[in-house]
Image (tube, rainbow, N blue to C red):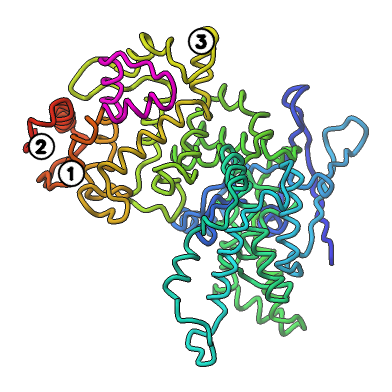
Amino acid sequence: MRDITREYDAFLIHQTPESKPLVLFAASAVEIEQWAGVPERRKLANEETAGFQRQQDPRRIAELIKFFGDRNNVVQNPLLGALQDNQRVQFYPSSPDSPFGRLSITYEDHSSLSMMTMLKRIVSHLESRVSGLGDDVVDEARVASIMRLESVATSPEDSENDDREDDSDSDIDETLGLDESTIDDAEATASVMLAEETHLVDFYTELRARIRVLEQRGTEDAEEIQGFTKSALLAYLKPVVLVDGQHRLIGAVESARQSIKKSDGKQKIIDAVKGGSTPELAEKELIESQSRRLPVSLLMDDSPSEHVFQFVVVNQKATPMGKALLGTIVSTSLSRSELSAVADRLRRAGIKLEDSQSVAYLTRSEDSPFRGLVQTGMAGDRADLLQWTVLRGLVSIFRELRGGRPFNQKIDYARAWKMEYFPQCGLVGPGTDEERFEEWSRPDGPWRDIFVRFFSRVRDHFGDATEVDTYNGWGSTAVSNLFNKVSLTILAADYFDFLYTQSESLADMDDFERTLSDWLKDGRVSPSYFNRDWKLENVKKDQLAVKRVWAQNWQEYRKVPASGLPRKFKP
């Protein structure tokens, strides 16, 4: 396997005595593409990868291609990179203690790597990052599901010699989800605990499963396997990771490649071929000659936690990104130990880490009523999913015990319950009020179990999780009177109103379940409350007047169900 080494004049600086060094240099865009990986946060076969870059924006790339097409244009801000393999990137000072020197970057000819080699190398890298990875944490049910999908994909559709039972409908149903009967309880518990703070274990399982598929095929190579492509996986294998600037790099590379399509470019290729070159070599040399040199700032640190920290700070402070994607990236790109290493720095940088962890768990955990129903900020999100910020707001009511104010009142009942009845709450251990609340509000604190059970009861009592495009649908905000910011907030605030006015301190989980039944009047609150046409044509749900009417309607009916279901939902 051939190694390629590139060297560049470079300048090394330390911003502080404690910081890792930065190396400043310039390189051809087509060369950078060869040794710098862009680990995008994307979905491969509906499974999120462990990258942190946003997915490519075609419109932005098109604009940059046009910009770079004018050879007089200059982009001043550098690409931001960091080490992914510190053995293959070295700085050699021109003399002892000199900041000037040569940067050497060695990379492989990735075109010769097989899919099996790529998968195994990434698996090995993850195992070095996360202690405990191995056969014990691999979700065998998920592996079996991928194997079945592979079997369906590679089997002839109309095989007359297939003597299996024709039960394709049930087979396909099984491949779309986990067969829970095959999962040992201990395995399931361990999987959820690991996924609680990191998505890396899930990504690890997806990689291991595809290794099994290749073994089953009896082959080492494939361009694509169940949604995982070689081009996407390459980002994890290059010696440098691009933290910021992927669109500039892609725009510069594509601008250079377009030179072979222009009339003068075609003539240069013809002249080179007449001179004895091959067409392929002539095209390659033309692209390289037209590739502009881009400035690069390379952080000499191979820590994934530092990579994510730099990415978050750059994109939150300089070029703000969507809260959903930012939260997804922060809470799912690192292992538990890696996350703890930069947690304080992220908090000091203004990133609400615990909120992101809490919401990320609720969008992924099997027991969460919001699993798969919240926007992640990645391409492929359905427009009718619940917004990340909405779920974060609901979380804050339960986790922080604030924000539980009915839209038609001034009192924050979550805060009032915290002040008066939380000191007697039996769901947390002994200690000072501050220590008890700290225990309650941890990302995995007692609040989370309360949150999951509360909204599971709401879904099961009022909602329809199978037919989501109905008035009481659970899973789509398009037409549902229930699954939306306003209704879910009203229900949460009203529950804390109930706890406060009924002097409930929640002695234990059984006591909590009792309060849920009391809140719903032992079932006398009609399950059909939301499953009716509220005649909301041309009405925006988030208008204050609408929210006040909905809150008042709900409170009056919930307290006295015998009064009958409300008829008016417009202000």
Element class at badge 1 = loop
Q: What span is in magenta?
A: 492-518
How many angstroms separate mark 3 from mark 1 (CA)?
Answer: 41 Å
- Labels 3 and 1: the sequence-earlier one: 3
Residue, disc 1:
528
Residue, disc 3:
434
- The reply to whether callout 3 and callout 2 are in contact (CB within 8 Å) is no
Q: Main secondary structure of the magenta part?
A: helix
How many angstroms separate mark 2 from mark 1 (CA)?
Answer: 9 Å
Q: In the rendering, which numbered label is found on residue 414?
A: none
Q: Position of residue 217 (x, y in %)?
A: 68, 76
In the image, what residue type sits under mark 1?
Ser
Q: Please, which residue is most extreme toward the right here?
A: 96
In the image, what residue type sits under mark 2?
Leu
Residue 231 vs 421, above or below: the answer is below
In the image, what residue type sits under mark 3?
Glu
Q: If the image is split into quadrants, where does the C terminus sit?
A: top left
The mark lying in front, picked from 3 and 2, is 2
Name the side, left or right, on which 176 lies relative to 481.
right
Q: Position of residue 14 (x, y in %)?
A: 76, 28
